[in-house]
Image: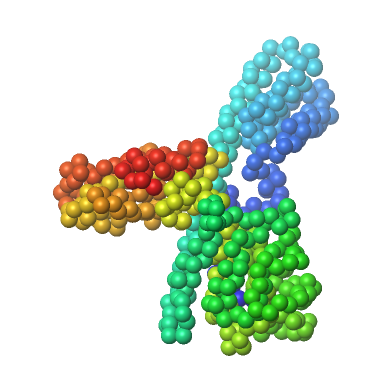
Amino acid sequence: MNTVSPSHAGNSSKPRHSNPFGNLGRFRRFVAPAVARPLAIVETVAFMLVVLVLARVIAPEDPLLAHAGFGWLWIAPLIVALRYGTLLGLLGGAMVTGAAMFDAHTFEAAWQTPFLLGGLVQTIVAGHFGDTWGNRAARASALNDYLNDRLVALTNSHYLMRLSHERLEKDLLTKPTTLRDAITELRRLSVTRSAEGEMARPAATDGKNAAIVGAQALLEFVAQACQIDVAALYPVEKGYLASRPLATIGDSFELDGHDPLLVRALESKHIAHVHGNEDNAVTRTGLVVCAPLVAADGSMPAMLVIKRMPFLSLNFENLQLLLVMLGYYADGVEHVTLVDSVLRDVPACPVDFALELARLSRLERECGIASSLVALVFPRDEAGDSLYEHVLRRRRSLDLIWPLRTPNESVIVNLMPATDGTGVDGYLARIEGSLEAQFRVDFEAARIGVHTLHLADGEPGRALARFLKRSGIDG
């Protein structure tokens, strides 16, 4: 066994995407493309010309096949309309009409007008059907991609929780930090602010690739948690390691870019170590471990090269922890730009909440999938605190909750993905019904303030700041 990886990294390095049409082959995907290609007009014209020429060759005395007992020629515009939509379907119908006008004796026939009109109506109906379901499929695909990303994040969180319990039992007395502390520190490093007060972003190394800000702090923390003596963190540029490391720890060493252990880690995007490789070529390596930083989308911004570490630390559990920590940090660096767009205006916003808010705003802007914010404001007294705790327990599994406390009020800010005004009304009705059943009060009787905001095209941080101010909270 030559790799050690968590649940999401043990599979293919390519990101998984939901497919509402099933697993279509190349031929089926060509027949029913998910989106219209740029050459759709050329394909339509060529297809219609071929059909018209074949019809003229098969029946030169009846090139429109109007006397065949069925309007066979109109099947071609029908296929174009279902494949590309109404406009290109009408283009195919126009070419059929033009072919009818080309034959003057055929065009003057009394049956010609109903024949052409019926075909055009059929094409418009089929094109409308194709447009409608194409848009619905695109929306469903975008929503499924978002839900798949949420599922990956939840899977990683559960995996980290399981590792935390296992390592807590084994290393509580020998380790200075727990896995929970490691996660907190990695999150802080990935979104840390620079001395000038700006969010730390990847800085350009050669104008094309980005280095990881805070790489030295990351390497020092990982070395302490995993007992690493000599190591270096190199940026990965176009599938190859850069010549200079981002950070080093311990004695400096020269890295061979053709080292077999390093090559194997770059090709597989999995951690590679000397004890897990039975290949004779790998035994000639001068390294101990090569661990890539792989984000959730499959990108690999950097590679951790370990030259020396204690023999007893080179075990399955320790390497698992190392890969999980690197992947968690890579995800944080990948999302730092989105988080920054919110934290600039609301510095107190939790990182997870800011990330999902920015992603949902982009989803609404690009695909029109509505999401909403709901704030419930409770008075800070004995009854209000009881209602506050009750509503916190009634959250939906997909929602993200940001609980806030002030000297006079308790606020629950609820981010509801893929929820429009109707969904918000249903959520508020369910919460109010639960309060009436449990405490015999409604929002008005309990003095609970309700504020809603539907995410729109714009900057999510400013929208959240205005929403919090309207709810009585200064972000």
- Up-down: is 384 above or below 288? above
Q: Nearer the viewer, residue 58 or 317?
A: 317
For the point 77% across and 21% down, the residue is 99
Q: Quadrant of residue 309?
A: bottom right
Q: Is residue 162 above or below residue 113?
A: below
437 up-or-down from 14: above or below: above
Residue 216: x %, y % from top left? 61, 68
| Residue furthest left in the image | 440
Tell me if I can see residue 182 in this picture: yes
The quarter holding residue 292 reads bottom right
In this rendered view, identify the residue nearer to me: 9 or 321. Answer: 321
Residue 439 lies, in percent from the top left, at 17, 52
The residue lying at 63 percent from left, 19 percent from top is 117
Residue 13, quarter of the rendered image: bottom right
Residue 96: x and y in percent read: 73, 23
Q: Residue at x 72, y 53 (%)?
A: 208
Residue extending farthest to the front is: 196
Residue sitting at 39 percent across and 44 percent down? 373
Q: Is residue 90 found left or right of 424 in the rendered image?
A: right
Counting from the top left corner in percent of width and height, residue 84 is at: 66, 35
Count of numbered labels shown in the rendering: 0
Q: Is residue 270 above or below residue 312?
A: above
In the image as oriented, which residue stretches furthest toward the bottom? 312
Residue 184 lies left or right of residue 302; in this view the side is left
Residue 72 in sight: no
* Left or right position of 41 against 124: right
**Colour scheme shown:** rainbow
Say which quadrant the N terminus sits in. bottom right
